[in-house]
Amino acid sequence: MVGDKTIEKMKLNRFNNCENWFCPVCAWKKTRKNALKISSLMQYLKEDEEKEFLFLTLTASNVKAEELEDEIEHYNQSFQRLTQRKAVKQADKGYVRKLE
Ligand SMILES: [Zn+2]
């Protein structure tokens, strides 16, 4: 027999990941969950706030595993500098950022 506590735990764990960083199933679940959140947020901003969206993709060359941490740090600093530019500040009312 399954007690209430176990059911609650199952509900909580249903969307939890298996803690394997490279698990494709968990990555897919997380992506789907985020996409749903972002899509309802975008719908609200478009309809109720009458905001427009810009989609920006920034790419960089691949780096070796041991250089990845520095590269991410460099990327974050560069992105921060971009958001501080006057033209960007004037147009930008917020953003969603994803690093892959
Ligand atoms: Zn998993």
Image (cartoon, grey):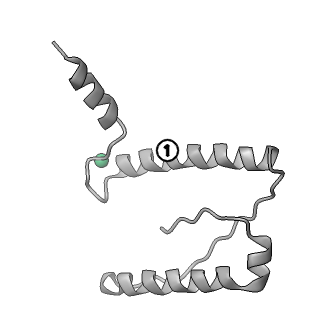
Looking at the image, which residue sits at the far top?
1
Q: Position of residue 2 (x, y in %)?
A: 19, 16
- x, y (%) of residue 44? 73, 44
Compared to residue 18, the image places residue 13 above or below, namely above
Q: Is residue 8 left or right of residue 81?
A: left
Q: Is residue 96 above or below residue 32?
A: below
| Closer-to-camera residue (14/8) | 8
Please give left or right for residue 22 compared with residue 92 in the image.
left
The residue drawn where x is 51% and y is 80% is 76
Please, is residue 29 above or below residue 79 in the view? above
Q: Secondary structure at mark 1?
A: helix
Write the residue at 79% across / 72% down: 91
Indicate the quadrant containing the N terminus: top left, top right, bottom left or bottom right.
top left
Residue farthest toward the left in the current orientation of the protein: 1
- Label 1 sits on residue: 33
Q: Is residue 7 left or right of residue 47?
A: left
Q: Nearer the viewer, residue 61 or 96?
A: 96
Q: How many marks?
A: 1
Q: Position of residue 88 (x, y in %)?
A: 75, 78
Q: Residue at x 72, y 44 (%)?
A: 43
User: Label 1 amino acid?
Assistant: Lys
- Tell me what residue is drawn at x 48 percent, y 87 percent: 74
